[in-house]
Image (cartoon, rainbow, N blue to C red):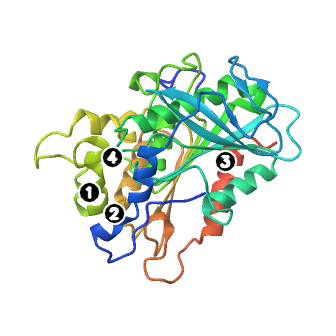
Amino acid sequence: MSRHGSEKVPRRVRWRVVVGATVIASLVLFVPPVLAGALGGASPPGVVAGGSASVTGDDGTSLGPVGPGTTTVTYCDQGGTAETLDIEEPTPVPSGPVPAVVYVHGGGWTGGNSSFAPDSLVGQVASAVEAKGWVVVSINYRLAPRFAWPAQIDDATCAIRFLRANATSLHIDPRHIGAVGDSAGGQIVALLGLAGPEAGFGGGQDSDQSSSVQAVVDLDGPADLTSSDWAGSPVVQALAPAVFGTILGPEPVGSPPSALLKAASPVSYIGFGEPPFLIMQGDEDTVVPPDQSVELVDRLRAAGNPAELVMVHGAQHEFVSATGGSVTPDIGQLASAAAAFLVEHLGTR
């Protein structure tokens, strides 16, 4: 039995690096998102952007009309800051509960937002899922440096609980929720799949609901923040102090890893009975070392869990070509594989 219990239910500023770029040049990509995260305002929980009428959610929160297309809703007031999530309902709106796929963006824990390009890997997965009549959700979460870890995973767990608490209004089957995340979002969705209540993430609103997910697609996400291979990732090491208060890996050399880094590492929570994982990783990634994904899938399999690793040849971080040529599999093939994985493990309707 999994430690989650017998019923384990329960578009893009991205972290991209061009090969050969300096650390300083890479960090410039994150300045606008960091400032936006620090200066952005907040709305009260449950307020819907642009709604004209209201629908009462399962937890009594007043939600706006949830019809075809995208509705933006605030969720989970954590520490005085309420974040938003985008709910994409199919056309026609489901007559009953359907599976949901939740996207968690990357951005080095310091940037990014819930939007994504339709032709991106995530956009293609979302289109395929929505074409089946399923619900697609994309979340925003608090960002460092204003909000240090674990604010990011606290918000993500709260978002999943919010979706379950309002499942009827949102046409979501609470027993069939999958998660897709890239880069830092990959680490977050892996934690959603692996870290049970004992990890202590989240809390507060909708605490009677589960934050677990039933399938995980991890796109080049960090898995073991205590590993020494982070020494080869200068970009992440430059960001880490603002997020975790320390660089990643055993620091100083030879000392045990910090408890915070261990608790933030998905590999720390692996047991038997975990949800199925699909992990995709670029083999030329200099931001998140490829060994991170190898370690995660190896540990999942060693514990008797279903896990698949797709190593993308010729790909840098976020599957950008390392040479300017093609990557194998290409983005379309990766999106098809991810969508098929979600359909297989979340249902066939």
Mark found first going from the N terminus, 4 or 2 = 2
Q: In the picture shown, does residue 138 fall above or below 76?
A: below
Mark 3 lies on residue:
342
Mark 2 lies on residue:
27
How far apart, in angstroms, are the residues tagged by discs 2 and 1? 8 Å
Q: Residue at x 32, y 70 (%)?
A: 25
How far apart, in angstroms, are the residues tagged by discs 4 and 2? 22 Å
Amino acid at dot 4: Asp
How far apart, in angstroms, are the residues tagged by discs 1 and 3? 34 Å
| Circle nearer the viewer, 4 or 1 | 1
Q: Secondary structure at mark 1?
A: helix
Mark found first going from the N terminus, 2 or 1 = 2
How far apart, in angstroms, are the residues tagged by discs 3 and 4? 24 Å
Q: Secondary structure at mark 2?
A: helix
**From this viewpoint, is residue 9 visible?**
no
Mark found first going from the N terminus, 4 or 1 = 4
| Circle nearer the viewer, 2 or 1 | 2
Amino acid at dot 1: Ala
Q: Position of residue 235 (x, y in %)?
A: 30, 61
Q: Are marks 1 and 3 in contact (CB under 8 Å)?
A: no
Amino acid at dot 3: Leu
How far apart, in angstroms, are the residues tagged by discs 4 and 1? 17 Å
How far apart, in angstroms, are the residues tagged by discs 3 and 2? 33 Å
Q: Residues within 10 Å of mark 1 (few under 14, many from 20)?
A: some
Mark 1 lies on residue:
238
- Quadrant of the snapshot with the C terminus: top right
Q: Are marks 2 and 1 in contact (CB under 8 Å)?
A: yes
